[in-house]
């Protein structure tokens, strides 16, 4: 929005959780952080990952919602569920391939990252990407990101599901998409005709 | 006399630390109201002093907004910066002066508390002499306050004993830079990091202790720069290192001498630079001759080929930068460690140019500014030596006294505590310092505190040390007085006053001026505002190395910081030192200084076979007296844990989460094990931010670097034993925080 794009680069993440803390300062969900943060395997590594919602072109969360409570705006932002419609069924929580939506029982509602809509819709940067000390979360112009070692990708394959996202994942140069399933690498998957399991 | 009046648990119940989770007025209530003002100022935590805007409503800081225009951090903040605003309205905040009673502490009027304090100080000085009173200061104070403390000690009390907690921070680097360059400042602005082809990070957990610096290093890598990291632990930024050197604790000096050995052996030095700009090269060449890679590998545990590769990467780069911090400085040869790194830069001509040089990552908020203007035991304002008669004459003229009235150099921070322990110093007035948590050998500190005949504390929260006080004077947070700081880069910044101190709390500077009045020295402390103190500081620093004369509050605002030295009002400041090829020494040369190997002050042995090293976690600041009160900062790491490699853990039958007793030659504590492959298997690590029987500093020792007087926090010897179960502290209510209790349930 306003010429800025959101980029996530776990290789830059230092695990400080500034994003987690800054997120809960936001006006729309004060006291609740919408960042997904993980120590990948603390025993083996200091690697950590912080994610925002990927704001998919065709959001799985919205497609599986039986109450039609999850809306994508014209600017591509996928919002928290509409409070009057949301029935708190958790379909979205289970279906999202990235594990983003959360149910907040005290509000009987699904809430998620809305890319700081109150800020980004008026040209400001989201809280998390503004404060991030390592810029593992960045909200910058594409020409700025072009100077990075890693390059943006926004096509993910989860088995047979192809997901195109508005938020970009920074990956080693030359990577166009991110296959996450062994099936995506197996020869017969792309060449043999197999019985489809639906 | 100064035993705490009631148990630490009872004091903790009243004064905290209680972790606060919501801003003043609550997430959904008062704090939702819009801010009335946004105040452009700086974070109070750590030497980077990031720009931040505080949201203010009424007389309360209710939140923050990133300050994206500020050139150092462009709005970036670590979690401490994000949550720093939660201190002002914190329920633990001291709102009145307190005086000890047999049943605890009672609130007192300012007159009572100040009269009592000054009367006790005078009585003790009359009975035991001027130097029986000592002052402790803090590097997190704005420079006006640290200047004021130095003058207060020397003019109002006439004692030679004043020192500060910066003694526990980067003083080894300060001494080394003075010896080599004649001045104690990082010689380069951080923007140079992005221009280097090689960045050599020595003993600096950048990700957790200087998080914003990470972005500078990543931008350097984006431009093709190589990253070399020296650390016994794989800290978060080591994941992206091109070369990681897993140095054994306390052996850095051998490693850096070994790298210089390879540089000289392979004729990679910069002869032209050495001949034109330096002295002492031949002696240093001689001193590193025995340190061949094989010898160094045996000493340090770093493979010979890595030593060779580091030397070649560094020396062949056109532009290379060394960044170093507490890892090398917190050793009994901390000064030599820094000198060895400087020797490496000088031998390869890496100084005084864009993208080249060495820099200390100063740790504390205003760690740089707080050590420049007179709260160090051996310095007068402007980084002048207290032993220099010209400096004494200049300072005395500014202060309106005779040079003879300025006391001589006094004891450093640890030495003051030792003098208290042996009964030489009888009274202590401490501001912004929590020595019971931050000094080494905490049991010794505790015994010393009990011997004080008078102990006064100026602070905004009740620290663990303040439990021992006779009087606690409720002082001010950083955002409650206007002033300046100086960042790790050497950039002088403007700290804006956002609010008044709450309740009956007062500005620290007011407290010291009122005490001076009561000590009969009021005419030397006539300041109505901190701006008046600053104008005197500018004059006092004039002509010194740290010359602030040309820096005004307005000029700082206009240019978003001015780098010292800045000798005149039309001077633009000095972001990079030595660009004209000259050091600050009278001969204008950079000095190579010979370094000599020696063992740690607490060597490992059969009885104590494991290296213990201590440090920080990202959510906590120093002794934790501020950050242990903020739930969001505490919960990710609520208690210290023992980091241990699976191989060493297996030797002791330890699994993740097991309780383990760590015993040093001083004491023992019991913590949970955090079994990780990111630490050397001959070493364990404990973060030091906690008090009492969770305190890493119960285990550390009081060996000091002979030049800088810094304690050797980074190297102790210990032994380990699997504990039968949780220790007392973990079973007391509030011992393990709610979040952990929840997790464990």
Image (cartoon, coloured by chain):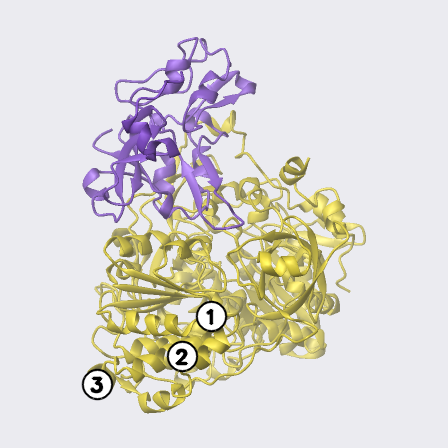
Chain colours: A purple, B yellow
Q: Which residue is mark 2?
A: B293
Within-10-Å neighbours for mark 2: few <14, some 14–19, many 20+: many
Residue B76 visible in the picture: yes
Q: Chain of mark 1?
A: B
Identify which residue, B200 or B357, lies in the foreground: B200
In this view, the residue in front, A158 or A192, is A192
* Residues tagged by mark 3 and mark 1 found on one chain of the structure: yes
Judged from the image, the secondary structure of the residue bearing numbered disc 3 is helix
Circle nearer the viewer, 3 or 2: 2
Q: Position of residue B379 (x, y in %)?
A: 46, 76
Q: Which mark is residue B203?
A: none
Residue B468 image position (x, y, % from top left): 71, 59
User: Which residue sits at x=49%, y=29%?
Assistant: A32
What x and y, as percent, mark residue A104?
Answer: 52, 21
Spatial CA distance of label 2 from label 1 is 20 Å
Q: Quadrant of the N terminus of chain A?
A: top left
Mark 3 Cα shell of 10 Å, populated few (<14), some (14-19), many (≥20): few
Residue B580's image quarter?
bottom left
**C-alpha separation, residue under disc 3 versus residue under disc 1:** 29 Å
Judge the density around disc 1: few (<14), some (14-19), many (≥20) Cα neighbours within 10 Å: many
Tag shown at residue B276: 3
Q: If you read the primary sequence from the N terminus, does the residue marked by circle 2 or circle 1 appear first?
A: 2
Chain designation of label 3: B
Q: Which residue is mark 1?
A: B328
* Cα gap from disc 3 to disc 2, whole angstroms: 29 Å
- Quarter of the image with the C terminus of chain A is top left
Whether tag 2 and tag 1 are in contact, CB under 8 A, the answer is no
Residue placed furthest toward the right: B102
Q: Nearer the viewer, residue B234 or B69?
A: B234
Q: Is residue B378 visible?
A: no
């Amino acid at each position: 929005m306003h010429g800025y794009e959101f980029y996530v680069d776990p290789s830059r993440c230092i695990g400080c959780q500034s994003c987690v803390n800054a997120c809960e300062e936001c006006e729309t969900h004060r006291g609740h952080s919408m960042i997904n943060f993980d120590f990948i395997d603390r025993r083996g590594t200091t690697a950590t990952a912080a994610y925002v919602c990927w704001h998919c072109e065709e959001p799985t969360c919205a497609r599986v919602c039986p109450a039609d409570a999850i809306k994508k705006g014209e600017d591509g932002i996928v919002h928290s569920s509409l409070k009057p419609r949301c029935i708190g069924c958790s379909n979205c929580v289970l279906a999202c391939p990235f594990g983003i939506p959360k149910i907040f029982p005290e509000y009987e509602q699904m809430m998620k990252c809305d890319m700081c809509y109150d800020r980004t819709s008026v040209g400001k940067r989201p809280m998390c990407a503004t404060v991030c000390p390592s810029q593992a979360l960045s909200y910058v112009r594409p020409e700025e990101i072009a100077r990075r070692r890693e390059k943006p990708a926004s096509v993910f394959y989860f088995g047979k599901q192809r997901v195109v996202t508005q938020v970009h994942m920074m990956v080693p140069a030359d990577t166009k998409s991110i296959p996450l399933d062994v099936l995506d690498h197996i020869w017969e998957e792309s060449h043999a005709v197999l019985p489809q399991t639906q | 006399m100064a035993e705490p009046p009631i148990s630490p648990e009872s004091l903790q119940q009243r004064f905290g630390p209680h972790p606060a989770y919501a801003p003043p007025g609550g997430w959904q209530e008062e704090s939702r109201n819009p801010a009335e003002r946004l105040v452009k100022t700086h974070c109070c935590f750590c030497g980077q002093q990031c720009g931040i805007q505080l949201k203010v409503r009424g007389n309360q800081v209710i939140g923050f907004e990133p300050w994206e225009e500020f050139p150092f951090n462009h709005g970036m903040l670590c979690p401490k910066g994000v949550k720093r605003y939660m201190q002002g309205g914190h329920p633990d905040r001291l709102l009145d002066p307190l005086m000890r009673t047999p049943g605890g502490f009672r609130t007192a009027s300012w007159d009572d508390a100040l009269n009592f304090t000054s009367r006790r100080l005078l009585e003790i000085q009359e009975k035991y002499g001027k130097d029986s009173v000592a002052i402790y200061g803090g590097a997190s104070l704005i420079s006006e306050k640290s200047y004021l403390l130095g003058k207060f000690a020397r003019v109002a009390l006439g004692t030679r004993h004043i020192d500060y907690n910066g003694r526990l921070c980067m003083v080894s680097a300060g001494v080394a830079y003075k010896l080599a360059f004649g001045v104690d400042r990082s010689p380069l602005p951080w923007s140079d990091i992005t221009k280097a082809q090689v960045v050599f990070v020595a003993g600096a957990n950048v990700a957790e202790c200087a998080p914003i610096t990470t972005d500078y290093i990543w931008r350097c890598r984006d431009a093709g720069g190589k990253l070399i990291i020296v650390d016994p632990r794989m800290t978060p930024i080591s994941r992206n290192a091109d070369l990681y050197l897993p140095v054994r604790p306390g052996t850095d000096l051998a490693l850096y001498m070994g790298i210089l050995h390879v540089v000289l052996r392979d004729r990679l030095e910069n002869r032209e630079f050495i001949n034109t700009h330096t002295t002492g090269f031949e002696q240093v060449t001689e001193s590193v001759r025995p340190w061949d890679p094989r010898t160094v590998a045996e000493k340090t545990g770093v493979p010979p080929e890595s030593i060779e590769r580091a030397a070649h990467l560094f020396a062949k780069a056109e532009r290379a930068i060394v960044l170093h911090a507490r890892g090398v400085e917190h050793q009994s040869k901390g000064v030599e460690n820094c000198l060895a790194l400087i020797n490496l830069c000088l031998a390869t001509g890496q100084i005084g140019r864009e993208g080249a040089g060495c820099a200390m990552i100063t740790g504390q908020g205003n760690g740089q500014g707080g050590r420049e203007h007179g709260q160090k035991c051996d310095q007068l304002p402007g980084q002048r030596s207290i032993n220099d008669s010209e400096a004494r004459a200049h300072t005395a003229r500014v202060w309106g006294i005779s040079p003879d009235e300025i006391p001589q150099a006094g004891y450093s921070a640890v030495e003051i505590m030792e003098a208290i322990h042996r009964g030489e110093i009888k009274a202590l007035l401490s501001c912004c310092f929590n020595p019971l948590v931050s000094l080494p050998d905490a049991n010794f500190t505790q015994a010393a505190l009990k011997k004080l005949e008078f102990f006064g504390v100026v602070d905004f929260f009740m620290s663990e040390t303040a439990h021992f006080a006779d009087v606690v004077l409720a002082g001010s947070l950083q955002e409650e007085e206007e002033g300046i700081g100086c960042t790790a880069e050497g950039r002088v910044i403007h700290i804006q006053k956002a609010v008044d101190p709450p309740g009956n709390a007062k500005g620290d500077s007011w407290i010291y001026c009122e005490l001076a009045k009561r000590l009969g020295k009021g005419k030397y402390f006539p300041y109505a505002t901190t701006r008046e103190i600053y104008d005197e500081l500018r004059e006092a620093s004039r002509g010194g190395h740290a010359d602030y004369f040309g820096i005004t509050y307005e000029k700082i605002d206009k240019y978003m910081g001015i780098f010292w030295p800045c000798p005149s009002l039309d001077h633009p400041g000095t972001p990079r030192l030595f660009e004209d090829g000259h050091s600050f020494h009278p001969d204008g040369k950079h000095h190579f200084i010979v370094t000599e190997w020696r063992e740690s002050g607490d060597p490992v042995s059969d009885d104590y076979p494991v290296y213990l090293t201590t440090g920080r976690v990202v959510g906590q600041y120093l002794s934790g007296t501020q950050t242990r009160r903020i739930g969001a900062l505490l919960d990710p790491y609520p208690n210290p844990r023992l980091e241990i490699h699976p191989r060493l853990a297996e030797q002791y039958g330890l699994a993740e989460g097991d309780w383990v007793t760590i015993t040093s030659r001083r004491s023992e504590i019991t913590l949970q094990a955090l079994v990780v492959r990111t630490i050397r298997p001959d070493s364990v690590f404990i973060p030091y931010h906690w008090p009492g029987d969770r305190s890493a500093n119960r285990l550390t020792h009081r060996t000091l670097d002979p030049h800088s007087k810094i304690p050797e926090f980074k190297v102790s010897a210990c032994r380990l034993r699997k504990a039968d179960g949780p220790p007392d502290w973990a079973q007391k209510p509030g011992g393990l925080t709610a979040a952990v209790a929840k997790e464990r349930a």
